[in-house]
Image (cartoon, grey):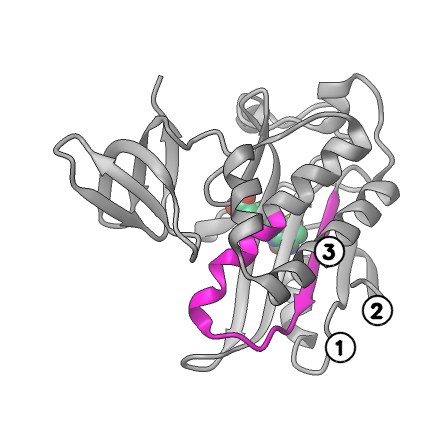
Amino acid sequence: LGKQIVFKESVESTQKEAHKIAEEAVEGTLVIAEEQKAGRGRLTRVFHSPKHTGIWMSLILKPDLPLYKAPQFTLIAAVAVAEAIRDTAGLTPEIKWPNDLLINGKKITGILTELQADSDRIHSIIIGIGVNVNQQSFPEELSGIATSLAIEKGEMVPRAQLVQAILKNLERYYEEYMENGFAAIKEKWESLAVSIGRHITARTANGSIRGKALGITDEGVLKLEDEQGAIHSIYSADIEIDQ
Ligand code: BTN
């Protein structure tokens, strides 16, 4: 992965650039920028991506797989990035389902997986990864919820080394996944996840559900047991861990 690299000083969003080239790009093409003017988060949110401080990148994969497997790639990426941060910066993030990495309860990484597909097969998966690396401070509205590796560690972290470690891990887990399936990665994911076994509130498009997070399925779907003992499958939500 990352044999083809599209590097840009400034873009609106590396996701947007990756979408434009995905069809003709070779698998493993990486779009990476020093700054995003309109970085995209989940659910139409903006992802703050200031110049020269973080890792803002989108990776194009082309697995020959059915569409329903796509959510697993967010979880593969979360494990790959968490371990890269651990090995490069010596800090161990926790995963908050489905796609956030947290250190001391604050967001260090966001992952956005988007697709080009027909009705049942994946053409391209675009995995967008944003890591807050060397920011010294955040705008007021983010300072309570976001942090950077430099703030947590008290020293700067080399971005190039971290990008390399992320790509290396992604390549390893992607190969492992295509050969042996999701089981081993799922186990790692669960061991890094903060929410499993805890009481959480999941805010979905159809309202909130409170209950105990039981784990994830092989498809990356969150299983939640509500107070009446009914089991819910959560495909997309924001979760909050109850205190
Ligand atoms: C989220 O936390 O909601 C997901 C954030 C994903 C941000 C990354 S940064 C690189 C790539 N380009 C984007 O516009 N978004 C993703």
Residue 46 showing in the rendered view: no
Label 3 sits on residue: 172
| Mark 2, residue position | 4
Mark 1 touching mark 2, by CB under 8 A? yes
* Position in image of residue 209 (x %, y %): 23, 37
Task: Please tell me the numbered disc located at residue 211.
Answer: none
Cα gap from disc 1 to disc 2, whole angstroms: 8 Å
Q: As displayed, is residue 110 above or below residue 11?
A: above
Rendered position, 62 above or below 142: below
- Residue 215: % across, % down: 39, 40
Residue neighbourhood size for the residue with mark 2, other residues' Cα within 10 Å, grouped as few (<14), some (14–19), many (≥20):
few
Image side of residue 171 versus residue 118, left or right: right
Image location (x, y in percent) of residue 199: 32, 26
Query: What secondary structure is marked by label 2?
Result: loop
Residue positioned 28% across, 50% down in the render: 233
- Viewed as shown, does residue 122 lie left or right of 17? left
Residue drawn at 29 percent across, 46 percent down: 204
Assess whether residue 59 is covered by the magenta stretch. Answer: yes
Q: Earlier in the sequence, mark 1 or mark 2?
A: 2
Question: Within 10 angstroms of label 1, few (less than 14), some, or many (20 or more) residues?
Answer: some
* C-alpha distance separating marks 2 and 3: 18 Å
In the rendered image, is residue 105 in sight?
A: yes
Residue 90 sits in quarter: top right
Camera-side mark, 1 or 3: 3
Where does label 1 land, which residue?
26
x 22%, y 49%: residue: 206
Of callouts 2 and 3, the N-terminal one: 2
**Which element carries disc 3, helix, strand or loop?**
helix
| Image x and y of residue 236, in percent | 37, 51
